[in-house]
Image (spheres, rainbow, N blue to C red):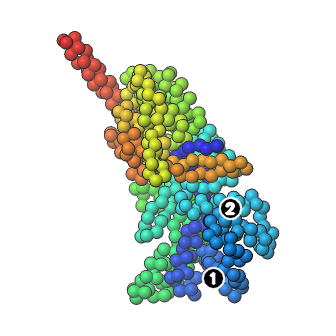
Amino acid sequence: MTRRRMGTFASITAVGLATGFAWAAGSRLNAGLPERLLDRSTTRIAQASGDGANPGRLRRVAQRPQVSDDDVGLTPLDTFLQVYQLVKQNYVDRLPDDRKMTHGAIRAMLADLNDPNSRFLEPAEREALDNEARGRYAGIGAPVSILARKRDGHTEHKIVIVAPLPGSPAEKAGLRPGDVVTHVDGKWVLGSDPFVAANRVLQRVKARDADEEDLQKAVEAAQQRVRGGMTLVQAQKKLTTGQDAKHTLTVQRAGVKDPVKVEVTTAVTEVAPLVARTLPGGVGYIKLNVLTEKSAAAFKQALADLPRQPGLVLDLRGNPGGLLQPAVEIGAQLTRGGNLFVEMGPQNKRRAVTTPVAQNRATRPIVVLVDRGTAALAEALAASLRDKGVGTLLGGRTFGDAMVQTLYALPDGSAYTLTTGKLLSPGGTSWHGAGLTPQLAVAGSTPEDQVLTRAVSVLKNRANVAAAARGRASADAARR
């Protein structure tokens, strides 16, 4: 069984990153920093190679133990199975059961992709993800995304709040889209290499712009960060699991110089797919909260219940995305179908995501409200409506996540997610990283009634222009 979804929605549960940052840091440090500045705890965290760890106790065996002439040219899978058999036969202590060892191997393989959204899920984590697909969220009730960026030759990962969901603890605590979580309960989230600063000081020592005392301090600070920090996995679990647990989050917020501390208590948040009503002037309004298994059917009913003229205000603000299929079905309801998205997969191969064309389907003009919390498949839906000439985007720049994950269920109840593609708009443009720029910009501080008034005004103007065009066409036909 597979299920398609977008990056930010898929990354609500724990990320499969283990402690790769500390491992990578150790590899560099063992080659660069003076050994006397590294204590044993750092070396253990760094998972130092066998040659460098406890050489006095390391017993070497033949380079190719028990290898026959038939073993020449072993495939990578053969090599893996050989190591597995040797571990089973020779490990001194009691081994974990085969299921646990298999899960560990899968987890390590996916972590080696260095993609936080490709990860192994234990049965309980898969169940949590299934619940989210039904609109039921544990933890703080805010989808989060792991963003990566290159800085000075190193990759930094950040846990970013995508959109606090309606009625969630995150919304009540005042968290905002785009908040970067740097600490959970006072512990630094190890999203970047804590030894980068020490390596910079090392370069200054070599250039004689600093002394070894500065280097010692830098290394000690890095070691303290490792000891007092938590991995991305641990931070993700605290944010997305549990009930009645109190957490203090430290976040970096755009436009705010100092870190912001937020107190939040976890709970289970039930999110309705949408809210619909009629605005002044007879304009239909649908606030689509998330894209879950229930969204397409609820949207179809809401659309049928609302007046058709002069159009529709589709509110995608704070919508973190979700499942692919509901986005496709909703897009088809608002257009005449055809090419809704383009998926770019392995080797940059492109595949159109289409629905049957319905030339006789009447469409209505749409104003699509977007903001920083509009992410993933909500962005894809907005881009599709824009490119197909149906929707006008109004609001602020969107989140900028176009990656697609596929969920593969395994027979033992576990699963794994794998990044399998990137979505483009029907016109072939990408919004990944940059987000969508609305055609009509509205400041985030604009009062809600003014935003809706402007949206209604845009729709009425479009309706008047369309009516005038129809009138001119009728007059021309009568003259002929």
Label 1 sits on a secondary structure element that is loop
**Going by the picture, which residue comes out furthest to the top?**
478
Q: Which label belongs to residue 124? A: none
Amino acid under disc 1: Asp
Indicate whether 261 appears above or below 445.
below
- 458 on left or right of 273: left
353 or 413: nearer the viewer: 353
- 2 on left or right of 84: left
State the residue at coordinates (28%, 19%).
Answer: 470
Q: CA distance from mark 2 to mark 1?
A: 24 Å
Task: Residue 324: give x, y in percent of width and height.
Answer: 53, 40
Label 2 sits on a secondary structure element that is helix
Task: Residue 403: give x, y in percent of width and height.
Answer: 48, 49
- Residue 53: in sight, yes or no? yes
Indicate whether 16 appears above or below 330.
below
Amino acid under disc 2: Gly
Report the quarter where the C terminus lies: top left
